[in-house]
Amino acid sequence: MQKLALAGLLIALPFYAPLADDAKNGQPPGWADGIKLSAQVEAGGTYNPSNPDDGKNFGRLFDDKADGFLLNQLLLTAARPMDPAVKGYDYGFKLQGMYGTDARYTHFLHEFQNASTGQNQFDIVEANVQMHTPWFTDGGFDIKAGQYVTLEGAETIDPSTNYLYSHSYIFNFGIPLKHTGVLTTLHATPMLDLYAGVDTGVNTWFGNGDNNDAWAFHGGVGLNLLDGKLTSLATTHIGPENAEDAVRNGLLPPTVHVNSEWRELSDITTTWKVNDKLTLVNDLNWIHDDTLNAGRSANAYGVAQYGVYVLNDMFALVVRGEIFRDADGVFVAQSGNNVDFVRAEEGLPPTSARSVTSGKTTYGALTLGVNIKPALNIPQLSTFLIRPELRYDRSLNGTTPFNDSKDRDMFTAATDIVIAF
């Protein structure tokens, strides 16, 4: 009942607030005209010529199946984006649900988590209300409350905003995915945005949807330079993230006090639009956890560099090179079945013997891809995108994480299709 009540509140609040504001200021109604309904489908497949017995591509989450196709996402969205041209008060909301294989890794704890244990699952990606105010500066002050995606990283859950089908090590293991809380944005100047908020933690929810009893901070600094051609977003998420059940189940020592032991996930994403053809994106990442390494501290850090070159209206070439160092061997892992990733967040032991890490490893990966946007001239389609890619992963320090924990490297070929209405 608590979840249903909050969901109803999140949907209802945007409708009350602007109507009251319009009436107060004598503005004509029209807020509802900005509500948008959309649907998006992503399906893809990955071929691993080594044919691992466990059927898994180690180090991958969303494209973890070694051979065959996945319905990654059926994404349904109802949203009323805030109008950036409004100088006074404006109100918006976003409600987004997902069905598909990606939902195995995006769940808020105990929110539709156990509705299905199969390959395809359902998840609420976002459910929030938003308000823009003219407070403090000429650019104003924004407030977002509810469930929302993280500020961090160069890649997103929404595949249409990514350059490649497969995800980087940073996206999979170096950043949060979603939060429940309040996030504010101060548009200090046209070049400077300041972010600050509090939330329940990484991929968590209120009540039994949180794996501990502590709150966390999420915020950062955004720069908008060269008339928008150069942007940089430096963000961090800081707070206790380990589960109380991890201590109860012996996964962490009894000396660990989960509500006072912190995890910091920090990221800097810089995008430079060099010209109309070439875009460069750099993603820097660092993680520290006070106790995740059997009661001792754990660290990981990495960099991913993207280059995107637009050949014409139909084709763009993409390259991503990355290095990710899991210095204590606890962050990069494989989920052997459909539920163990979320079980790990809960502090529960895995149910599959193939839910494994690979020890202290430095991972390198090179991915080459093509974005193909056929000119279909179908007004109902806002996106039609095909993304074939070739990827090579390698342990740079001699460990053997790949292909049933036997190989030092792994080659994959993949493609996906994204269609939005």
Image (cartoon, rainbow, N blue to C red):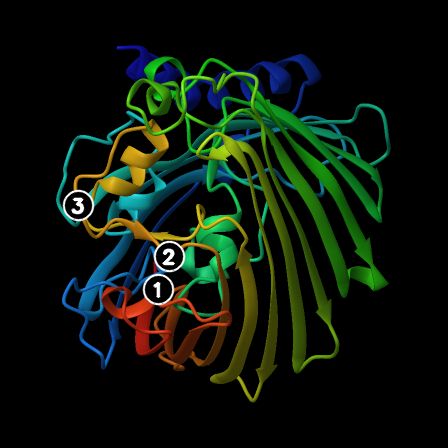
| Mark found first going from the N terminus, 3 or 2 | 3
Question: Can residue 199 be seen by looking at this rendering?
Answer: yes
Q: Nearer the viewer, residue 145 or 206?
A: 206
User: Which residue matches tag 1?
Assistant: 401
Residue count near mark 2 (Cα–Cα under 10 Å), binned few <14, some 14–19, many ≥20: many
User: Which residue matches tag 2?
Assistant: 358
Q: Amino acid at mark 2?
A: Ser
Image-based side of 315 in relation to 124, left or right? right
Q: Nearer the viewer, residue 97 or 355?
A: 355
Residue 125: mark in rendering: none
> Depth-wise, is mark 3 or mark 2 nearer the camera?
2
User: Which residue matches tag 3?
Assistant: 352
Residue count near mark 1 (Cα–Cα under 10 Å), binned few <14, some 14–19, many ≥20: many
Secondary structure found at label 2: loop
Image-based side of 366 in relation to 247, left or right? right
Secondary structure found at label 1: loop
Give the Cα separation between the discs numbered 1 and 2. Answer: 5 Å
Q: Amino acid at mark 3?
A: Ser
| Mark found first going from the N terminus, 1 or 2 | 2
Q: Residue at x 35, y 21 (%)?
A: 209
Location of residue 92 by image quarter: top right
Secondary structure found at label 3: loop
Image coordinates for residue 129, horizontal then vertical, percent: 51, 26
Q: Amino acid at mark 1?
A: Pro
Image coordinates for residue 59, horizontal then vertical, percent: 37, 60
Mark 2 and mark 1 in contact (Cβ < 8 Å)? yes
